[in-house]
Image (cartoon, rainbow, N blue to C red):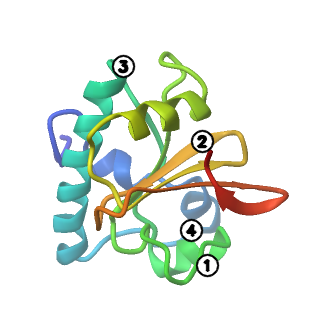
Amino acid sequence: TMTPLSAHFSLEEALVSQTAARLGLENDPPLDVVLNMKRAALGMELVRQLLGQPIHVNSWYRSPEVNKAVGGSPKSDHLTGFAIDFVCPTFGKPEAIVRAILASNIDFKQVIWEFNSWVHISFNGTQRQALVIDRAGTRLFA
C-alpha cells in the first residue's frame, strides 16, 4: 500500500533513487524529514494544480549517503526532504515550467532550471530565488 504525503504524491515515489538501488544504499528518512516532505508535498500540489498535469518526480529525499553518491551539495535541501527534482513533459519543457511557477503566487525558496533537463524546487522558505545551473555554471534565471 502507498503512504500518501498528499493527494497526488506518495512517500514511496519520494524515496525512489536509482543511485541508491544501484549502490545498495539506504534511503529511509527520519520522522522529522517525513514531516518536511509532507509540507513540501503541499507545495508540489500547488505546482501540479498550476501545470494541470501529472508530475514525474526524479529525486526528492536523499539520505546523506545517496546525496554524496550523486554529488549533491552537503547543504542540499534534498537531505531535509524539502527539495524535489521533477519534470512534467505533458505541460512542457523545464524552462516553461520555471516561467509558469515564477508567474504564479506559489511560495518557494528556490526554483532551478537544471542542465536543460529538469526543474529543482525547494519549499523551506519564501525567497523565490530563480537560478539556471548548467555546464557554464550557476546564474540567475532571466
Foreground: 6 or 105?
Answer: 105
Q: Secondary structure at mark 4?
A: loop
Residue marked by disc 1: 68
Rendered location of residue 54, percent (x, y): 36, 24
- Please rate how many residues cluster around mark 1, counting C-alpha atoms within 10 Å: few if below 14, some from 14 to 19, many from 20: few
Q: Position of residue 29 (x, y in %)?
A: 30, 71
Secondary structure at numbered mark 2: strand
| Residue type of the residue flagged with mark 1 | Lys
Identify the residue at image location x=34%, y=73%.
Answer: 80
Q: Regarding mark 1 in the picture, which secondary structure is present there? A: helix
Amino acid type of the residue that numbered disc 4 sits on in the rendered structure: Gly
* Residue found 43% across the figure and 30% down from its top: 100
Instruction: Point out the tag, 1 or 4, that comes first from the N-terminus.
Output: 4
Residue drawn at (39%, 56%) of the image:
128
Residue 24 - label: 4
Look at the numbered discs 2 and 4 and tell me whether their residues touch, using CB distance below 8 Å.
no
3D distance between C-alphas at marks 1 and 4: 14 Å
**Of marks 1 and 4, the one in the foreground:** 1
Q: Left or right of 125: which side holds 20?
A: right
Q: CA separation, marks 2 and 4?
A: 25 Å
What label does residue 118 carry, if any? 2
